[in-house]
Amino acid sequence: MSTLTCRIELSKTEKEGIVITVSNQEEYPLHCIQLNKDSVTITSKKGSDTSIIVQKSDSIEMNVADKTSHIVLNKNEITIKCPTFKLDADKIIFKSTGDTKFSAMNLTAEASIKANFEGNITKVKGSLVNVEGDLVTLG
């Protein structure tokens, strides 16, 4: 069991501000919170893994593993970049008042009971279009 070193540094410079650090003898630092004129930064490190959260008055940015997973929230946009994105919920509602675009190398949409695609102008296009079903109706 290692002993933690806890340190609070106060600085009047705009860049440094207040820094709270928790570390141990094996790794330095483990956790760090920095409050300065421009932002609040929280850093957590263990071995080669590091996560960083930077909060400013107009944005929040989160990075894990040297930006392998990256989330940016600001007043106009939320950006998520990651190797795999999983969403698991009992109910999901998407609503867009503007255009909505899905882009993928391969796209699968599947429903176990019912699937509806509806619009004033609905188009299905492809170099090969295959419509299958026990009962297929047109019109």
Image: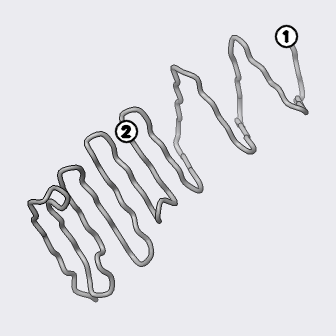
Q: Residue 80, position in %: x, y?
A: 50, 47
In percent of the image, x 54 and y 54: which residue is there? 82
Which of the pair 114/58 is nearer the observer? 58
In percent of the image, x 70 and y 23: which residue is there? 116
Q: In the image, is residue 27 above or below residue 105?
A: below
The amino acid sitting under disc 2 is: Asn
Q: How is the image coloured?
A: one colour
Residue 16 occupies which quadrant of the picture? bottom left
Left or right of 79 on screen, residue 59 = left
Which of the pair 117/32 is nearer the observer? 32
In percent of the image, x 26 and y 83: which residue is there? 24
Left or right of 4 on screen, residue 88 = right
Helix, strand or loop at disc 1? loop
Q: Nearer the viewer, mark 1 or mark 2?
A: 2
Q: In the image, is residue 69 above or below residue 130?
A: below
Of the numbered discs 1 and 2, the one sitting upstream in the chain is 2
In percent of the image, x 19 and y 80: which residue is there? 5
Left or right of 102 on screen, residue 38 = left
The disc at residue 74 is 2
Tell me the quarter of the image containing the C terminus.
top right
The disc at residue 23 is none
Q: Residue 108, position in %: x, y?
A: 73, 40
Disc 1 to disc 2, C-alpha distance: 45 Å
Alpha-carbon neighbours of circle 1 within 10 Å: few (<14), some, or many (≥20)? few
The amino acid sitting under disc 1 is: Gly
Which residue lies under the disc numbered 1?
Answer: 139
Tell me the quarter of the image containing the N terminus.
bottom left
Q: In the image, is residue 43 above or below residue 93?
A: below
Q: In the image, is residue 56 above or below residue 115?
A: below
Helix, strand or loop at disc 2? strand
State how many labels appear. 2
Residues at marks 1 and 2 touching, judged by CB atoms closer than 8 Å? no
